[in-house]
Image (cartoon, rainbow, N blue to C red):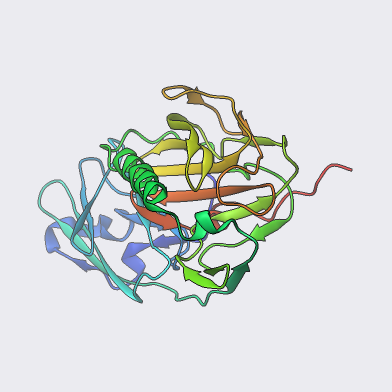
Amino acid sequence: MLHRLGIFFFLGLFALACVPSLGARGEDAVRLDGPLVQGGLVRGFAPERARVTLDGAVVPVAEDGRFLLGFGRDHPANSVLEVHLPGGASLRRELGIEQRSYDTRRVAGLPPRLVNPDAEGLRRIAADRARIVAVRAAPPTPPVFASGFAWPALGPVSGVFGSQSIMNGEARAPHNGVDVAAAIGAPVGAMADGTVVLAEHDMYLTGQSVLLDHGLGLNSVYIHLSEIAVAAGARVRKGQIIGRVGGTGRVTAPHLHWGVNLGQTALDPALLVGPMPPLAP
């Protein structure tokens, strides 16, 4: 059974515009499961061969009608979901997206070269980013996340999604994941079933890094590792050890940075899972 992210949202209950040919099945033809909030991931269910768009952009749909919607850190308060069903019927729904406020995180003591890189550092950063963008832009694969999601590491949460980053006193991009403080060598598991699409040992800002593809454009990244235990192309299961916590890249202390994206849109990993499980005594 799919892990539940929130209350089912039955589209027919929210003043959908529905063409007459849809008939009495309009109320349950499409449904959404998940939080309509900035940083949230929503799972959708539609009839087979449906075509789905969000704000005019085409949303990948699996053969069985499953699809995903993701709302970034600064997503506007309203979106329009349209579902075109086989036979010509269509549904239109205006989605209200809950807006959030974000903390500011201040990080001091970083090596200057990691805050204001020289020309070679900038070249490496650009190359690393281009590699990750290209991986995330690959054609969507079938979904393999039906077993749900789990925390990839255990420990205090030392950084939260969306916080504005101030590094060595200088403003930088908002934090696009969750940080889990843990000792070097602590195990890091896959958040869900997936395929390793990137396993790099020396990225400039992120150090040793692993990126997994979970299907339909959903991907997760695990960075600052001290060790990588998988290779690109490997299939992994939820909870399988893919690496070890480390302090590589731009860090001041050992931790795991865990990020989740739908395509190129960063989401809040904490919204996929429940509270952090207690540490073993």
* Residue 247 pos. (x, y %): 64, 44
Q: In this view, does 234 lie to the left or right of 16?
A: right
In this rendering, does residue 175 appear at all?
A: yes
Q: Quadrant of residue 38?
A: bottom left
Most foreground residue, 235 or 206 = 206
Q: Residue placed at 72% from the left, 45% from the top?
A: 154
Q: In which quarter of the image is residue 148?
A: top right
Relative height, residue 48 to residue 42 (above, below): above
Relative height, residue 214 to residue 85 (above, below): above
Q: In which quarter of the image is the C terminus?
A: top right
Q: Residue placed at 53% from the left, 74% from the top?
A: 102
* Residue 85 pos. (x, y %): 18, 50
In this rendering, does residue 33 appear at all?
A: no
Q: In this view, does 174 lie to the left or right of 44?
A: right
* Residue 135 pos. (x, y %): 33, 38
Most foreground residue, 93 or 148 = 148
